Image (cartoon, rainbow, N blue to C red):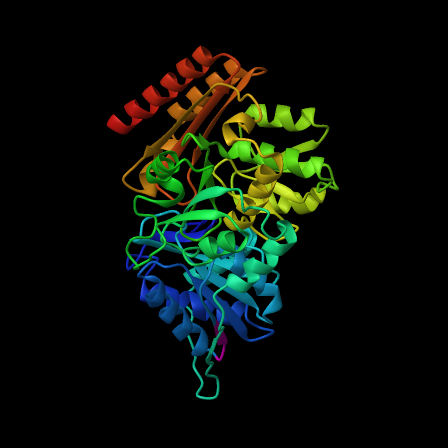
Amino acid sequence: MTQKLFGTDGIRGVANTFPLTIDFCTKLATTLAQDVCLNKKQVAIARDTRISGTMLFSALVAGFTAQGINVIDLGIIPTPLCTTLTPQLNVDMSIMITASHNPYQDNGLKLITADGDKFSDEQSRKIEQKLELNHDITYSPEKIGKIIPWNNNGLEHYLHISSQIVPPNALKKLKIVLDSANGVFSYIMPEVFKYLGAEVISLAASPDGYNINADCGSQHTEKLAQTVIENGYNLGIAVDGDGDRIIICDENGKRLDGDQIIAYLATYMLQNNLLPSKAVVATIYSNLGLGKYISSLGLNYYTTAVGERYVIEKMRDVQANLGGEESGHMVLSDYTRTGDALITALIICAGIARQNRQLSKIFPVFTPFPCESHNLRFANKEAATQIMQSEALQSCVSQISQQLDGHGRIIVRPSGTEPVIRLKIEDENSQTAHQAAEKILTCIKNLTAS
């Protein structure tokens, strides 16, 4: 059975529209209560700052508590903190209510195991199959759960972690613009950097439920770059709404590619004896130049399917403590279980402060292969799926793959969270990459028009 509800990062959609409805969330919680919460009889639920978070939280709580399951209310905290806390909370699972970098109208549910891992494809598939069954739900007056508040906002956790990464006042020479996306790091991130001695300008740190990711954060870095330039600051750091994605710009406002950040982290960690397994994990969507560079350092380079959880699975297989995606998810498993924008930012800033050089003199770390990249948006996921499955597109992709073999590659894939087809073509020759992209775009345009 193909998964209809679960994408690469849980369930995602528009709030108050299926599947992000009160009825569905209550049914999901009931199903999880009956099939997952069999040991501790307890779950933890966290959320980001979007307005629909409390609504969906209430629906999940109703479903769980009506089956006798206690709910630990973690409140508004970053996704990586939720995954890191979960194994310590004596729960059967956790749920993070978030749509990450998406606008406030969207929301989503990230299901997390008792060990702090995101549900696997197989686990998600089993839950989806259970949801499709029309079984009777039974209730008992003797089985009623309760809400247990978690009276913490996460700041103490990150202050403790920062002390392990950066010595006190080590960042006092750095001037940093921080864009918190009006999300989960709005209070935490500025406080941590100030504590470490950095001079800070804080942007998008006043969430109101509607302004999460709105013209700010990892997807909209224009104001971040402008503020860095106008104030003569060293760098800018932007995160997304739930805190697992990071974007950095240099002193000239130039946005640094996620692959370049992976390369920098690998270099810095290798130089400081922080890569015991000599391994780095990325995804197939990372530039071919990254793999070439990582290998040149004498490190083993591994790639996975696109999706943070696939990166984490591979990291465990090869005992790597560094992995990431070009989109900005960086996993530093010595400190966190999943991608954590703040921890990544701390390590990068520690390296920059030690080198005492401008970012424009450090980046780019490696020379990327010429690349053509396009995100093609459709009316809905069904339309995107229909195009992806068409024989015409598959034939065109196969033909171009043969032409690029040995000196380039083509990736055409559906987004796991949006009605988008992502196209990426790399080749040693930029003209070849461009011509190949034009062929694919023309093919998709013709299919859309027919």
Q: Residue at x 39, y 25 (%)?
A: 393
Picture quarter containing residue 264?
Answer: top right
For the question of whether residue 187 can be seen, the reply is yes
Picture quarter containing residue 184?
Answer: bottom left
Q: Residue at x 45, y 16 (%)?
A: 433
* 115 is higher (above) or lower (below) than 343: below
Name, please, the residue furthest toward the bottom: 142
* 387 is higher (above) or lower (below) than 126: above
Q: Residue at x 49, y 56 (%)?
A: 79
For the question of whether residue 2 can be seen, the reply is no
Give the percent coordinates (x, y) of residue 171.
Answer: 55, 46
* 27 is higher (above) or lower (below) than 264: below
Give the percent coordinates (x, y) of residue 265.
Answer: 61, 37
Q: How many marks?
A: 0
Task: Name the dominant secondary structure of the magenta segment.
Answer: strand
Q: Residue at x 47, y 53 (%)?
A: 189
Magenta region includes residue 23: no
Task: Tell me which segment is drawn in magenta.
Answer: 68-72
Give the percent coordinates (x, y) of residue 330.
Answer: 55, 43
Magenta region includes residue 71: yes
Quarter in which the C terminus is drawn: top left
Picture quarter containing residue 275?
Answer: top right
Relative to 383, is 305 on the left or the right?
A: right
Give the percent coordinates (x, y) of residue 27.
Answer: 40, 67
Relative to 446, is 319 on the left or the right?
A: right
Q: Nearer the viewer, residue 225 or 323?
A: 225
Q: Nearer the viewer, residue 236 or 62?
A: 236
